[in-house]
């Protein structure tokens, strides 16, 4: 990596920076400018409204349930496909990519068809007094679907590149499975796991398409923050919409900060290794050993 | 005789992790998809056919495919440029730019759609410069393309960046000492090495754009036959409680995206690695 040497290289940098400014920086700046357009009091006023507070509470609840489920699954999945070599391993890795390639609206519809009142499963749950669709459990279910690949897809390349020597050493020294994971694997993957967790959280909090299919958009009950943004925007309540947007943008920025911190840690530890990004499909991993 | 294990497991925990993984994949991912197929299979063929060939739905396929194609091309151009300057040069603000590239991935899509639509509206910060020329961006097709470009940009940059880091400037220097012009170096040395990464990034951004919903519906204006995407058609049919039609259209979308996904996996695994220098 060099300092740019001639005007042509500087021109490329300026061109790229302008593109990023237009497409990335301006939209971000606009969110905060609009949220604060009516002054600080109007923004805090919008935050205090009951619809907004209900949406925040629901969104946090969904994330609190979704994230641990997908973190546990992601770690187990990554362990399973990087620590053993069995038939169908590649298939399993491909299957976990399905939610990634599925349109969120299609995902929502799948759940609606299975767990809706018309279906056998849905009517059974309804008979037990539990409504799944157009209620919060449905929102949780589709959010779990949509955000299921992230932890696994970040950990798989990471654990693949780290190999199993350290785990085998621990095994020969008499450690049991939990001790190996807790004392050997976890310290090695902690930054990747942290990033996987925050990106799962970011996508869970921000999920729109799948949630809008199964939510029913009942004000104060099944409206998450992203849905509230759309409702407020349709009602021309710009400050309210952008206040909710600003909250979500803060979460996104925090996610980026944690990711950058993780990359710096990784670079400091091992200069050659590329940090895992969920924005790339993991290439089919080579056999372990 | 083929055995289940290609190599016998030595580390403990296979039963637990394999059991949980397959159970989760089956319950969370495969069952709902199968449910959709079963639901659709209850329709008659004529019913199915008329649902997926409704003129408004066919127009939505066209809008979605066209939008995703343009967006992928736009994301490729900007993404390659960004990947190139991020890998090759140091300049003030480089680390910030590198971090910002992931913004579309972390920012909820509804937020992206909202802010882009206001930014590009006739009175917006950017839209006001286009309005005098009669160019409408928000609530029109260009806005739809820009929303898809926004959400797919990180996929292109993050696919190309590591490969570009691997190829290194040595190749260009070698080409130059052998008398290649900068143009020849770009087209005959750098680009061929990047082909697999470009292909991966492009197909991911295309798949992503086909399925994008939140960002697009907030900005596209959703005019039937002109800026209505297929995901929105499914959503509209669902809110009309016409679940069979919605499910029929969803199977078309699902088949297309799964086909692309599997094709991509096969190409990545079998064909493309041969082109990688040193791989």
Image (cartoon, helix red, strand yellow):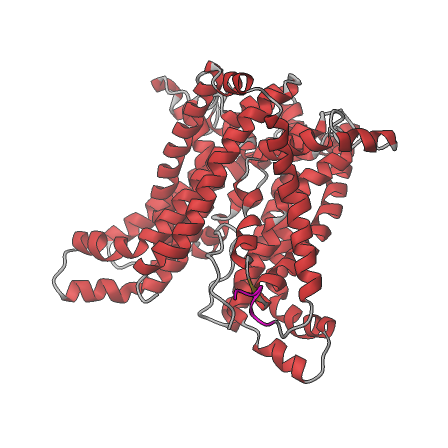
- x%, y% of residue B165? 37, 62
Dominant secondary structure of the residues highlighted in magenta in the image:
loop
- Compared with B136, B160 (above or below) is below
Q: Is residue A114 visible?
A: yes
Between B20 and B47, the one nearer to me in the picture: B47
Outermost residue on the front side: it is B1
Between A264 and B187, the one nearer to me in the picture: B187
Q: Residue at x 49, y 40 (%)?
A: B258
- x%, y% of residue B217? 54, 26
- Compared with A178, A122 (above or below) is above
- A162 with respect to A118 (left or right): left
- x%, y% of residue B235? 60, 24
The image quarter in which residue A221 lies: top right
The image quarter in which residue A147 lies: top right
Outermost residue on the left side: it is B179
Instruction: Indicate whether residue A60 is drawn in magenta.
Output: no
Q: Is residue B122 visible?
A: no
- B63 with respect to B218 (left or right): left
Q: Which residues are magenta?
A: B1-8
The image quarter in which residue B273 lies: bottom left
Instruction: Indicate whether residue B7 is drawn in magenta.
Output: yes
**Mark count:** 0
Between B84 and B93, the one nearer to me in the picture: B84
């Amino acid at each position: 990596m060099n300092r740019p040497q001639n005007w042509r290289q500087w021109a490329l940098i300026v061109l790229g920076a302008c593109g990023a400014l237009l497409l990335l920086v301006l939209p971000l700046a606009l969110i905060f400018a609009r949220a604060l357009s009516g002054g600080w009091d109007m923004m805090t006023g919008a935050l205090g409204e009951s619809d907004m507070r209900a949406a925040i509470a629901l969104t946090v609840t969904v994330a609190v349930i979704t994230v641990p489920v997908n973190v546990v699954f992601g770690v187990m999945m990554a362990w399973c496909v990087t620590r053993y070599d069995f038939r169908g391993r590649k298939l399993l890795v491909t299957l976990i990519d399905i939610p990634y390639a599925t349109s969120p609206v299609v995902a929502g519809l799948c759940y609606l068809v299975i767990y809706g009142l018309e279906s056998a499963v849905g009517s059974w749950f309804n008979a037990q007094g539990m409504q799944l669709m157009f209620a919060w459990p449905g929102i949780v279910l589709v959010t779990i679907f949509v955000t299921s690949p992230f932890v696994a897809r970040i950990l798989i390349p990471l654990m693949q590149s780290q190999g199993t020597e350290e785990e085998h050493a621990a095994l020969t020294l008499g450690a049991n499975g939990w001790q190996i994971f807790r004392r050997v694997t976890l310290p090695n993957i902690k930054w990747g796991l942290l990033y996987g967790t925050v990106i799962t959280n970011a996508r869970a909090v921000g999920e729109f398409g799948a949630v809008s299919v199964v939510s029913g958009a009942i004000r104060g009950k099944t409206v998450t923050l992203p849905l509230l943004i759309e409702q407020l925007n349709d009602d021309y309540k710009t400050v309210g919409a952008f206040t909710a947007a600003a909250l979500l943008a803060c979460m996104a920025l925090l996610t980026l900060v944690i990711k950058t911190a993780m990359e710096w840690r990784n670079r400091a530890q091992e200069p050659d290794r590329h940090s895992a990004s969920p924005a790339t499909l993991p290439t089919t991993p080579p056999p372990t050993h | 005789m083929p055995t289940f294990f290609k190599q016998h497991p030595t580390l403990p925990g296979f039963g637990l992790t394999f059991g949980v993984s397959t159970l989760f994949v089956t319950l969370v991912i495969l069952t709902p998809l199968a449910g959709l197929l079963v639901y659709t299979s209850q329709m008659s063929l004529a019913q199915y056919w008329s649902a997926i060939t409704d003129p408004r739905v066919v127009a939505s396929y066209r809008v979605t495919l066209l939008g995703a194609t343009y967006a992928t091309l736009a994301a490729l151009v900007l993404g390659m440029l960004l990947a190139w300057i991020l890998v090759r040069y140091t300049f003030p603000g480089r680390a910030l730019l590198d971090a910002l590239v992931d913004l579309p991935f972390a920012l909820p899509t509804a937020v992206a759609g909202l802010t882009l639509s206001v930014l590009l509206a006739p009175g917006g910060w950017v839209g006001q410069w286009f309005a005098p020329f009669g160019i409408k961006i928000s609530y029109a097709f260009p806005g739809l393309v820009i929303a898809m470009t926004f959400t797919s940009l990180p996929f292109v940059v993050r696919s190309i960046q590591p490969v570009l880091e691997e190829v290194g400037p040595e190749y260009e220097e070698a080409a130059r000492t052998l008398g290649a012009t900068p143009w020849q170096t770009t087209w005959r040395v750098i680009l061929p090495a990047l082909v697999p990464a470009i292909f991966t990034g492009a197909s991911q951004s295309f798949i992503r754009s086909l399925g994008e919903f939140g960002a697009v519906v907030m900005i596209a204006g959703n005019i039937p036959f002109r800026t209505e995407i297929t995901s929105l058609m499914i959503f509209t049919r669902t809110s009309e409680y016409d679940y069979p039609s919605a499910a029929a259209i969803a199977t078309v979308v699902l088949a297309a995206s799964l086909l692309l996904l599997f094709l991509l996996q096969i190409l990545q695994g079998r064909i493309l690695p041969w082109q990688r220098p040193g791989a």
